[in-house]
């Protein structure tokens, strides 16, 4: 029969039949309610005879034990459910299978519309997907600016990125006529390509998986520019009387409601004809023929391409591209509430939505 060891603590009541050494072995067994709960063998390997769980020490980052020694494990309440261990002199997240899945939307800045009777700016590259984030890891978010309006250059939008995961490419600037240098400038490739101008009549290409190409330019008498490409479709080709509309953007419901992003800018026209309209998703309209010939800007935080200028009596710039946006959706139970850059934080169903309109960081 196993022998029983009575345990006493100071003047407390004697605890009987609590710890016993099994007959013929060196095992120690902890009993609760008369049943074996924990056994420790002669190699000091513990075995729990239970379907329950272990409650380990928990607290904030500031409450970490000091000094810490290698092998310590605890639950960090600052990170919404992070197991961490002290290894080689530092606290490290216990990742392995401990991740959760985040959804993301990245939209780069849109390209600027072309000067004079140029092509529309391409929408910023758009990426939608999911990824696993590692608790305790800080991720850098960069939000791309729209391409700047210019009467003498073709300017692309800037990239947006989720560091270590993926990058959306800035939209291509629309083709333009540089009056100062009296030369035609070809449209630029980008997330979506810029629309063409008559002197270099082929629209620029988009980036596979992010956007579409810009439209080609038309011929005399009005040399109508092509529309900038969008994330959901190519820019429309200009004709001899009608400029191309910007390509349509792409819709996402990551915020809880459907929003369209990264439409292309409309193409411009020379003196007569019909100016192009911006594509759905923030694309800017081209300047009207015979009237206000300055192209309109792409909508901020949609990555819309700028509208091209239309020539009347002066050479002017097209519209600037719209700035981009980065949106992350995580399960609310896993949201860390650790950010920089002042993102807008909302909820939709069981998810927390973190929307960045300027650069910052998110710690998972």
Image: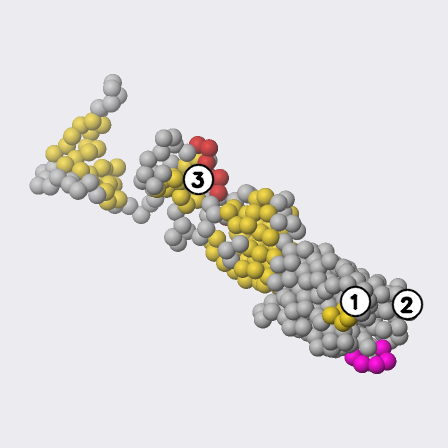
Say whether disc 2 or disc 1 marks the residue closer to the N-terminus. Answer: 1
- Around disc 3, counting alpha carbons within 10 Å, would you say few (fewer than 14), some (14 to 19), or many (20 or more)? many
Q: Nearer the viewer, residue 347 or 356?
A: 356
Say whether disc 3 or disc 2 marks the residue closer to the N-terminus. Answer: 3
Disc number placed over residue 76 in the picture, else none: 3
Tell me if residue 21 comes above or below residue 223 in the rendering.
above
> Residue at horizontal 24%, vertical 19%?
10
Disc number placed over residue 313 in the picture, else none: 2
Lateral position of residue 239 relative to residue 82, left or right: right
Task: Please say whether residue 323 is one of the residues in the magenta stretch.
Answer: no
Q: Which residue is farthest front?
A: 181
The magenta stretch is: 218-222
Image quadrant of residue 203? bottom right
Is residue 247 at least partly visible in the picture? no
Q: How many marks are shown on the rendered structure?
A: 3
Under circle 2, the secondary element is: loop
Query: x%, y% of residue 32?
Result: 26, 37
- Kindly check if marks 1 and 3 are in contact, taking CB atoms under 8 A apart as contact: no
Mark 1 → mark 3, Cα distance in angstroms = 62 Å
Mark 3 → mark 2, Cα distance in angstroms = 67 Å
Lateral position of residue 200 relative to residue 139, left or right: right
Front label number (3 vs 2) = 2
Say whether disc 1 or disc 3 marks the residue closer to the N-terminus. Answer: 3
Q: Nearer the viewer, residue 205 or 9?
A: 205
Q: Nearer the viewer, residue 54 or 174?
A: 174
Under circle 3, the secondary element is: strand
Lateral position of residue 291 relative to residue 149, left or right: right
Tell me if residue 133 comes above or below residue 59 in the rendering.
below
Disc number placed over residue 181 in the picture, else none: 1
Lateral position of residue 313 relative to residue 133, left or right: right
């Amino acid at each position: 029969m196993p022998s029983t060891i009575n345990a006493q603590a100071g003047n407390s009541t004697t605890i009987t039949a609590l710890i016993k050494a099994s007959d013929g072995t060196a095992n120690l067994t902890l009993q609760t309610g008369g049943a074996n709960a924990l056994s420790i063998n002669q190699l000091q390997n513990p075995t729990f005879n239970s379907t329950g769980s272990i409650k380990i020490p928990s607290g904030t980052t500031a409450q970490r034990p000091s000094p810490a020694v290698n092998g310590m494990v605890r639950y960090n309440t600052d990170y919404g459910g992070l197991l961490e261990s002290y290894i080689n002199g530092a606290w490290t997240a216990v990742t392995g299978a401990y991740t959760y899945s985040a959804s993301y939307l990245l939209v780069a800045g849109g390209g600027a519309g072309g000067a004079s009777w140029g092509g529309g700016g391409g929408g910023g590259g758009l990426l939608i997907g999911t990824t696993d984030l590692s608790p305790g890891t800080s991720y850098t978010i960069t939000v791309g600016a729209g391409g700047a309006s210019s009467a003498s250059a073709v300017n692309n939008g800037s990239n947006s990125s989720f560091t270590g995961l993926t990058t959306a490419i800035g939209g291509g600037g629309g083709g333009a006529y540089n009056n100062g240098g009296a030369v035609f400038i070809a449209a630029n490739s980008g997330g979506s390509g810029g629309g063409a101008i008559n002197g270099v009549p082929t629209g620029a290409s988009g980036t596979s998986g992010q956007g579409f190409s810009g439209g080609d330019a038309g011929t005399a008498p009005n040399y109508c520019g092509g529309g900038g490409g969008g994330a959901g479709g190519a820019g429309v080709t200009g004709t001899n009387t009608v400029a191309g509309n910007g390509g349509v953007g792409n819709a996402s419901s990551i915020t809880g409601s459907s929003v369209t992003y990264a439409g292309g800018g409309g193409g411009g026209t020379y003196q007569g004809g019909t100016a192009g309209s911006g594509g759905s998703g923030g694309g800017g309209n081209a300047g009207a023929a015979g009237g206000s010939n300055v192209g309109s800007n792409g909508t901020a935080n949609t990555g819309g391409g700028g509208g091209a200028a239309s020539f009347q009596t002066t050479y002017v710039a097209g519209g600037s591209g719209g700035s981009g946006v980065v949106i992350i959706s995580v399960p609310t139970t896993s949201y860390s509430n650790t950010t920089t850059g002042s993102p807008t934080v909302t909820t939709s169903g069981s998810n927390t939505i973190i929307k960045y309109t300027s650069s910052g960081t998110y710690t998972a």
